[in-house]
Image (tube, rainbow, N blue to C red):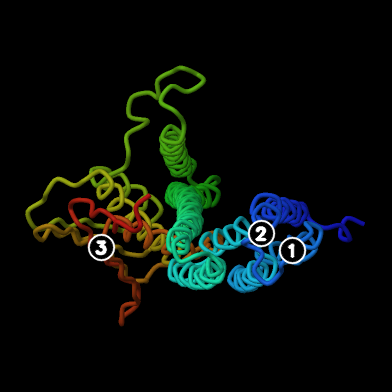
């Protein structure tokens, strides 16, 4: 039922068109005031005739919302006929059409339509002042032309201002949406980095504890203790992430606690290596070059690079694999390379846990700070992951800043 009724915007546009045309007839129809402006007619024209002749401008004004330039052209020619034949000079209708063109089309289109409209108005003014005496003709022509130029130019300027405001608002909305999307991607990367590694280690340790529970309770206890330690660390990192997302003073009003809000970094690599060694993956760390102080974002990213690489070694290589971690400082860059021999035996639980999103998120994380990431299979088996990171954060391009 509602589809048969005109939209509110169409109704408002129609009412505005009626008001504009009525105002043009009431304010700018001078045939009853001064017979010298009657042009072709020798007697003042009946206002009803002017109203009926002006009525076609109403649907054209409504049409301007769909075709602004075409509607402006029709209105301008219609107004020229009204001026020449009936002595009336519509002003508000062409101003509204010019405003619509300038607010909805390009600057060049607005300027072109303004020039064409002023040219037609010039013809109307010349025809209008022609019956006057030579003494009155120049002054009246200049005054009428000045008013028309000022009104039409003002319509275009206001339209361009509205268009600029609308564009700025759209850019602001797009920037906010991009900022929200970027924050969601960042949170997703953090959650993946925290959960994927921890859960992988916990699954392997739990599987080992289950297999050795009956034959070697002590070894099973060590595995379960490792599960507990990894779980505590994961909870600490999750709480750190939640602390970043919440205001400094949360509803509980308590402190986070010592060590809980410490972000991960290269200093925590020995603990990370110990976790994967506990599930049967042999891992070594090699340092070379003159180390430099890293920005916190780079330090966190470097840790996440090694963590994701070791998680993949543990998940796809399994116990028995050997991982080699090399960190080399070369001037303003840090190169991280993690390789494995692919000699392990992956367990079924960890093979089913791969989402395929870890490397995608890691590549985004590395790109954000201005680094590069490369992953590939080695000829003799296994994989190599190489990340080149700047020691200081590289600011994003100006167009991408929010």
Q: Estimate the spatial distance between the alpha carbons at disc 3 and disc 2, rounded to whole Å.
A: 101 Å
Q: Is the Cβ of the residue at disc 3 closer than 8 Å to that at disc 2?
A: no
Task: Tell me the number on the disc at residue 324.
Answer: 3
Mark 3 vs mark 1: give the one in front: 1
- The numbered mark, 1 or 2, whose residue comes first in the sequence reads 2
Q: Quadrant of the N terminus?
A: bottom right
Q: Is residue 282 left or right of residue 348?
A: left
Q: Which residue is mark 2?
A: 35
- The residue sitting at 34% across, 52% down in the picture is 401
Please say if 138 is above or below 158.
below
Task: Tell me the number on the disc at residue 43.
Answer: 1
Disc 2 is placed on an element classified as helix
Q: Front-most of 204 and 358?
A: 358
Quadrant of residue 74 within the rendered picture: bottom right
Q: Front-most of 24 and 124?
A: 124
- The residue sitting at 30% across, 47% down in the picture is 300
Quadrant of residue 263 within the rendered picture: top left
Q: Front-most of 388 and 112?
A: 112
Q: Is the Cβ of the residue at disc 1 closer than 8 Å to that at disc 2?
A: yes
């Amino acid at each position: 039922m509602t589809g048969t009724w005109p939209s509110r915007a169409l109704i408002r546009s129609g009412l505005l068109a009626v008001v504009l045309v009525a105002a043009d007839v009431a304010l700018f129809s001078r045939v009853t005031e001064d017979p010298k402006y009657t042009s072709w007619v020798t007697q003042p024209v009946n206002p009803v005739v002017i109203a009926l002749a002006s009525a076609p401008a109403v649907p054209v004004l409504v049409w301007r919302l769909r075709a602004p330039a075409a509607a402006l052209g029709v209105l301008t020619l219609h107004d020229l006929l009204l001026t020449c034949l009936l002595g009336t000079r519509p002003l508000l209708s062409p101003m509204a059409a010019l405003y619509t063109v300038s607010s909805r089309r390009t600057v060049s289109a607005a300027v072109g339509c303004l020039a064409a409209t002023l040219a037609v108005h010039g013809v109307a003014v010349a025809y209008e002042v022609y019956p006057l005496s030579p003494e009155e003709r120049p002054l009246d022509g200049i005054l009428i032309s000045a008013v028309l130029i000022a009104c039409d130019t003002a319509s275009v300027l206001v339209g361009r201002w509205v268009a600029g405001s609308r564009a700025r608002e759209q850019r602001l909305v797009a920037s906010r949406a991009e900022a929200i999307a970027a924050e969601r991607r960042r949170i997703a990367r953090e959650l993946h980095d925290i959960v994927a590694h921890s859960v992988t280690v916990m699954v392997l340790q739990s599987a080992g504890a289950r297999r050795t529970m009956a034959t070697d309770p002590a070894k099973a206890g060590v595995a379960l203790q490792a599960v507990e330690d990894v779980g505590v660390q994961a909870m600490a990192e999750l709480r750190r992430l939640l602390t970043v997302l919440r205001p400094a003073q949360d509803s509980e009003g308590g402190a986070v606690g010592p060590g809980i809000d410490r972000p991960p970094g290269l200093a925590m690599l020995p603990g990370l290596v110990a976790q994967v060694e506990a599930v049967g993956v042999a891992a070594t760390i090699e340092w070379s070059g003159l180390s430099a102080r890293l920005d916190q974002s780079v330090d966190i990213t470097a840790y996440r690079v090694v963590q994701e690489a070791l998680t993949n070694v543990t998940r796809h290589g399994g116990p028995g694999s050997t991982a080699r971690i090399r960190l080399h400082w070369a001037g303003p860059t840090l190169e991280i390379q993690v390789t494995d021999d692919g000699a392990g035996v992956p367990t079924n639980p960890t093979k089913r846990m791969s989402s395929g999103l870890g490397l995608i998120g890691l590549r985004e994380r590395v790109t954000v700070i201005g680094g590069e990431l490369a992953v590939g299979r080695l000829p003799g088996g296994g994989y190599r992951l190489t990340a080149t990171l700047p020691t200081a954060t590289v600011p994003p391009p100006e167009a991408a800043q929010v």
